[in-house]
Image (tube, rainbow, N blue to C red):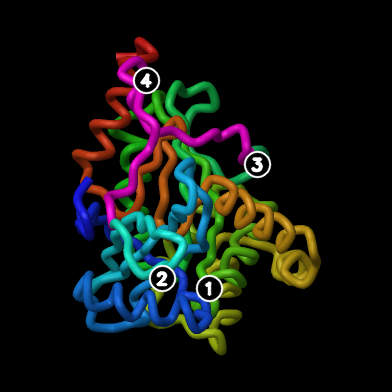
Amino acid sequence: MSTWSTAQALAATDSPKPATLNGNDAKLIAALQKRLLVPNLADLTLGPPSPTPLPGITQRTITVNGGDGQKFQVELFTDSSGDKGILTQRFAPFSVADPWERVDVKLLHLNDRPTLGTADAPVMIVEFADFECPYCAKAFSEIETLVNTTYKGHVRLAWKAFPLQGHTWAEQAAIAAECVRQQNPQAFWTIAGDFYRDQNEITPQNLRDHIYSYASSQGIDAKALNACILGSEAEARIDQDKKDGAAVHVVSTPTFLINGVPVVGLPTSNVFDFVITSQLRSHHAL
């Protein structure tokens, strides 16, 4: 651990807009802007303070959203005055017996969600995604290939909506896609691909036209779709997905949980292969 170190674990993601800061936090984040060399102050997010085992020492998570959607996080430890501190790379408990940093997927609602792959597959991937997220769009075909081809029969995917603050049509698109899924589960994946493909063309004003065009091509009943979109059930399901994401500390999209192992952002296929293969070997599936 070194004073004001800036170990940067980079991952391509989409992240929500920062919240409004109070006076003291504004001064702190202005200082961090200089220390971390961040040109745009809006790209710095200061997490809430939390106590540490050390008396008088407070811990906060600093998130930096860089160019082209990159993100890194460091931890800030400060004394009671808040004038001096230490920046360190994010850390987690470590065990040689089980070195993976896992989250508890039992906290998540996974029943009756969009899924691909074999129900009894030894590896479960949970994806938190946003239809406006360009990195989710890039990951879409890759993750489909992993489930349907590369690791067919060994991997199952569950998709959960995590529309980010500031994305103007993502949540309504997620509700519509859920309504499509309720009529035809397989059609969900087609309409998801449609949203990702047409991201640059969709606006809040023309979203409805896109939705009904996509749905019509899949033979979805328009009246039933409209009733579902205007109802409360699909919206409640999306709200639950957002709560689930917050419960396991999802802050950006895409975020994947591979048997509970977080893989954040748009990883290379090598990263997916490494984690999936390791999980399969631990289950004696390979």
Q: Classify mark 1: helix, strand or loop.
A: loop
Residue at (52% x, 41% y) in the render: 158
> Is the Cβ of the residue at disc 2 closer than 8 Å to that at disc 1?
no
Nearer to the camera, 60 or 79 = 79
Disc 2 residue type? Thr
CA separation in Å, label 4 and label 1:
35 Å
Mark 1 or mark 3: whose residue is earlier in sequence: 3
Residue at (62% x, 53% y) in the render: 241
Mark 4 or mark 1: whose residue is earlier in sequence: 4
Is residue 91 shown to the viewer in this render? yes
Q: Classify mark 2: helix, strand or loop.
A: strand
Q: Which residue is mark 2?
A: 45
Mark 4 or mark 3: whose residue is earlier in sequence: 4
CA separation in Å, label 3 and label 2:
28 Å
> Is the Cβ of the residue at disc 1 closer than 8 Å to that at disc 3?
no
Residue 196: x percent and y percent? 40, 66
Q: Which residues are magenta?
A: 87-110
Characterize the local packing of mark 4: few (<14), some (14-19) or many (20 or more) Cα atoms within 10 angstroms.
few
Q: Which residue is mark 1?
A: 165
CA separation in Å, label 4 and label 2:
32 Å
Residue 125: x percent and y percent? 44, 37
CA separation in Å, label 2 and label 1:
14 Å
Query: Which of the two marks, 1 or 3, is nearer to us in this view?
Result: 1
Disc 1 residue type? Gln
- Image quarter where the C terminus lies is top left
Q: Classify mark 3: helix, strand or loop.
A: loop
Q: Which residue is mark 4?
A: 98
Mark 2 or mark 1: whose residue is earlier in sequence: 2
